[in-house]
Amino acid sequence: MAPVSDSSPAVSEAVGLRTHPLTGVVQGALWAAAAVFGLFTSMFNGDGWQGLNPVLTGLILLIGGLLIGMGVGFLTWMFTRYVIDGTELRINSGIITKSSRRIPYERIQSVDIAEPLVARILGLAELRIEMAGGKNSRTSLRFLKVADAGSLRRVLLDRAHGQTAAEEALDEQRSIITVVPPMRIIIGTLLSLDFLFAALGTVAVLIAALWFDNVIAFIGGIIPLASWLVQIVGQRVIQQWDFTLSRGERGLRIERGLLSRTSQTIPYDRVQGIAIKEPLVWRRLGWQRLEVDVAGYASQGGESEGNNANSTLLPISDAPLANAIIAELLPGADPAIGNRTYASPRSWWFAPIGFRYRWVAANDSTFVASEGWIQRTTSIIPHHKTQSVELSQGPLQRRLGLATVEVHSPKGPVDADGRNLPADAARATMLAQLDRAREARS
Amino acid sequence: MRRVDALFEPVVGEWKRNSPRLATVRRILTLIFSAVFLVVGLVLALLLPDDLWWIGAIVAAIASAGAVWGWIWAGRNQRSWGYAENADDLLVTSGVMFKRLVAIPYGRMQYVDVEAGPLARAYGIATVTLHTASPETAANIPGLAADQATALRNRLTELGESHGAGV
């Protein structure tokens, strides 16, 4: 507790606090793991490492990565200090080039705690602070004791909502909404389309390789498919293991992970939108996956937008529970909304089957857009989070009297596009959305 | 044609247009670029052995065609840009083939950029770009006269502050 509770603010503001001394050890272990992982990946991809003894090289890399990582980690730790003052969190770091990062409390979008495996063994955790906007919007403090990380998060979230330390104690009353059993996640993943595709592809390539007795030629096919499979299992099963959703004073809390634990907080007023994803098989069983847009989350994911494990709100659930959670985060939202504007039948040319499943609608509080017949995605954006609205038309669409309307949200899984609506309806939707957004802001 | 125009009209009033000097700047850039390729093509045509001279000729032909296309495109594209400052949002339109109309509520603007390359500066024009928390917004207005651009930036910043609605 000591480093966090600002019992002696004068001291901590002048010098700043340090993270946990074992930071270097964790850093070293992480680097060593990354080095060995990198070696094996490049060996499997056949990048000219065949001449080396894998065990020996692996061992050298392991020890080298460990030592260098520990050294660098220790130096970084020596020179990193953080200061919590009245208006901002400041992190001063850098051995040669000094840098000082300022995080004004009111710009904090969410605060997460991550426990990578090694850190978890040592009882340490990384604190991740997300701010809105662009690159480098995430700031990490690594590593703190788990209890310290928890209380620092509470302090930051309270300050982010303009509260002083006195009211802190109120927060930790949480009630668990749901725990998603690992079995359910495994079954859900087994029944999801991309998993089936990756698994069938791998088996097919394997059989072909054995049949033609030409293993080398098929290695090139197996490796991408198998690593895709591993990635799916990693993101959907291992990272979502023991998924616990609970409700707190200011937002939902997510705890998940088999090897590395992550604990995320999603404040109610920071939710930019929710996407409901229903793959083909799941729809029959009435299952859904919920993903959430929080400014700052997706900018970390790089290419794998929408696949980001961070933005999962509920990995698998029945419709009633999903609807209850949507209603809690976005009051007034209605995924089964009426009065829909469907894509024009003239657009069958662009999507022979899919056009029937494209529609947009809006009620007093949210804008809803849905598309997809293999995987149906329904995006919900509350009016007061509408960033901008776009109307666009390509040459073919002009010929057919169609237009596309898009309601923009921060980068993430939510993508509320109404493609190929009748042109007049698209313009009407855009203007109406501008009005609704204006009313919701005022 | 009339119908299409109605689709991309501003809600109230008229579009404010950007400067035709944008077309001039883009034509100069296109001509420089094509000229380089034309020279490369001609040199290839002269240097390559007899049965391969046509490779150079094709490069030169593509360069010339590109110059003509770029000349026409620059004019049409410049005329397609327009913006309107409404009471609560900024509207920006652009495009000839692929038309686009984007509306950004002032309260959603995170920041506004003004930038100008060396050639644009020589011709006294600049590009104003609006950023919201969403990368899809991508609202830029190229080819504004430099003083117009600065004034717009200042106005937008003020409006953004007075309408400010957070993220």
Image (cartoon, coloured by chain):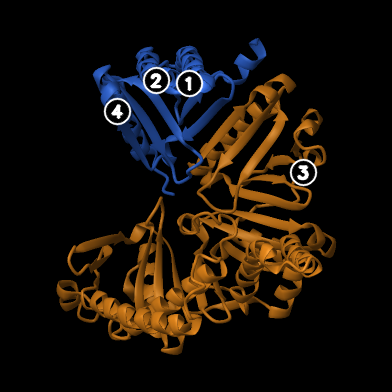
Q: Give the image location of residue A87, x and y in percent.
A: 26, 62
Specify which label sits upstream in the sequence, 1 or 2. Answer: 2
Query: Closer to the camera: disc 3 or disc 1?
Result: 1
Q: Do the residues at discs 1 and 2 belong to one chain?
A: yes
Q: Do the residues at discs 3 and 4 belong to one chain?
A: no
Q: Do the residues at discs 4 and 2 belong to one chain?
A: yes
Distance from disc 4 to disc 2, alpha carbons, whole Å, reads: 34 Å
Query: Closer to the camera: disc 2 or disc 3?
Result: 2
Residue B56 - label = 1
| B39 sits left or right of A295 in the view | left
Label 1 chain ID: B
Chain shown orange: that is A
Going by the numbered disc 2, the residue's amino acid type is: Val
Whether label 3 touches label 1, CB < 8 Å: no
What is the secondary structure assignment of the residue under circle 4?
A: loop
Distance from disc 4 to disc 1, alpha carbons, whole Å, reads: 35 Å
Q: Residue at x 35, y 66 (%)?
A: A159
Whether label 2 touches label 3, CB < 8 Å: no
Specify which label sits upstream in the sequence, 4 or 2. Answer: 2
Tell which residue pokes out farthest to the front in this image. Answer: B50
Is the N terminus of chain A in the top left, top right, bottom left or bottom right quadrant?
A: bottom left
In this figure, which residue is indicated by the disc labeled 2? B43
Residue A338 - label = 3
Query: Closer to the camera: disc 4 or disc 1?
Result: 1
Q: Residue at x 51, y 41 (%)?
A: B136
What is the secondary structure assignment of the residue under circle 3?
A: loop
Q: Give the image location of residue A23, x and y in percent.
A: 33, 81
Q: Do the residues at discs 4 and 1 belong to one chain?
A: yes
In this figure, which residue is indicated by the disc labeled 4? B116
Whether label 3 touches label 4, CB < 8 Å: no
